[in-house]
Image: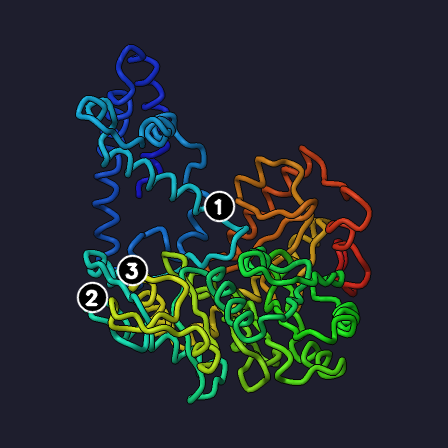
Amino acid sequence: MCSTALRGLSSVASGLVRRQSAWPLHLHVRNAITLRRDFCARANAAHALDDASSEKLGSASPWATDGWGDSVEIIEQTMPDAHRALLSNASVAIPTSSAEAGELPAVSDILGAYEAQLQRRTARHLGYPYNLDYQNRELDRFMRYSINNLGDPFVPSNYGVHSRQFEVAVVDFFARLWRADPNDYWGYVTTCGTEGNLYGMLLARETLPDGIVYTSSETHYSVFKAAHYYRQEVEVIPTLFNGQIDYDALATALRRNRGKPAILNVNIGTTVKGAVDDLDRILRTLSMTGYEREDYYVHCDGALFAMMMPFVEYAPELSFQRPIDSITVSGHKMLGCPMPCGIALTRRSHVRKIERRIDYLNSVDTTIMGSRNGHAALHMWHSLRTKGLEGIKAEVASCLKTAVYLRDSLSAEGITCQLNDLSSTVILERPADERFVKRWQLACEEDIAHVVVMPNVTTKKVDIFVAELVAMTKQHGRTAPRRENSPLTLLSSKAWGAHRAGHA
């Protein structure tokens, strides 16, 4: 895309709107977009020549590659007035008459402005765990098909436009990755990690109807949503300074409720701090407090890190060889897909509790959703096949290395920050200027924020982020702890070890 042309267009379009203020809005924006097309056509032709000779794998969007690391400097961040007008609620409204339709901008103009906005926002994206480095151009051809994996992935229905064979291959891959029993596993491609948690908690309720859900206070909100939906009793366990569950507090709660079964949600990477609960210690705690295997159900929320841990040397093993019952992971996070998706994997014996035959489908109902996006399964399969085990391992290693680089760069500037073991989530003091927070799309909790280092985050992007953060801090100051024992206060705790802000 022609960024120089876009910057030029911004000033030209603004001048057009000022000079032609008597024109209807849709004429303003159409003239502006016409200029945009004229400016960019020549540059895009030149880029096409470069792309034709490139050996690099392409992507359905040229902005969803590792070029993000370089694009930070060249993509204009301020939305031009013409684009703002095109993307207003009034412009994107769906008309209900021919007269209304005639007053609205052309669909192609709106979509052009929307694409430019996506380019701007994706260039500075650090706060949420989405891998934007995916190469999927060869899947474009399948977007013309309504691929629907309705019903059970292992039981074909009468609907023939599906991607079940790819979905089953993805499920099989994760079953081997997490060492599931070949004769007792089942899974499916979900819409996201939240659906995976909803599914795990549903199976837990069906397995242990009177069970109490034990989970840490830093658990993803979807687990609490599931407990609310299913009317499950919840024991919220406090956390340690780093975000892990407080194991002693868990043991106390388990002893107090010894007469009821236990449903454990284990966080394989918490939402804000990226803390990985110690699965083996939790299993020992269950045993030491008198719980037998039939007394508990263990669900592992591994939205991001369940995809990473198997590729980290000397990391704890996440495996169905241990007495666990379900794992969920997101496909659009570490793996990288253009739409939200994920995997729920469990023991086949649990699924039989909810399985129902549906004649209308000529399949069985075992999933939360009925119609399911077959494109998601295809994209996950494509990412796994094209990257391979070595490719994924290299991406994981790169993320962990770049996260250390970011932490050290922030510390060198005196910015309070920390990085959990096994994590690519760097926690830092919340920037004092909310415009900076929005500019970089940082996820915040009270007085802290975080950056999730994904494969598309390069050291060059890190350097730009740190430089802008330092400049912002000089102008707006630093955030003070909002209360006693606030997240920022805990971030400065000596319990983290030798590496604290300003210390190597």
**Which residue does the image show at 32% across and 65% down from the upper left?**
379
Q: Nearer the viewer, residue 254 or 119?
A: 254
Closest to the camera, between mark 1 and mark 2, is 2
User: Please, what is the three-letter code of the amino acid marked with disc 2?
Assistant: Val
Is residue 169 at least partly visible in the picture? yes
Tell me which label, 1 or 2, sits earlier in the chain.
1
User: Please, what is the three-letter code of the amino acid marked with disc 3?
Assistant: Gly
Q: On the picture, is 249 further left or further right than 352?
A: right
Q: Which residue is mark 3?
A: 58
Q: Which residue is mark 2?
A: 161
Instruction: State if disc 2 and disc 3 touch (CB < 8 Å).
Output: no
Q: Which residue is mark 1?
A: 124
**Which residue does the image show at 43% across and 50% down from the upper left?**
70
| Element marked by disc 1 | loop
Label 3 to label 2, Cα distance in Å? 26 Å
Query: Crowding at label 1, few (<14), some or many (≥20) Cα neighbours within 10 Å?
Result: many
**Which residue does the image show at 42% across and 88% down from the upper left?**
182
**Which residue does the image show at 29% across and 66% down from the upper left?**
149
| Element marked by disc 2 | loop
Tell me which label, 3 or 1, sits earlier in the chain.
3
Q: Nearer the viewer, residue 503 or 392?
A: 392
Indicate the position of residue 382 as horizontal and vertical percent values.
32, 69
Q: On the picture, is 87 further left or further right than 301?
A: left
Quadrant where the N terminus lies? top left
Indicate the position of residue 56 as horizontal and vertical percent values.
31, 63
Quadrant where the C terminus lies? bottom right
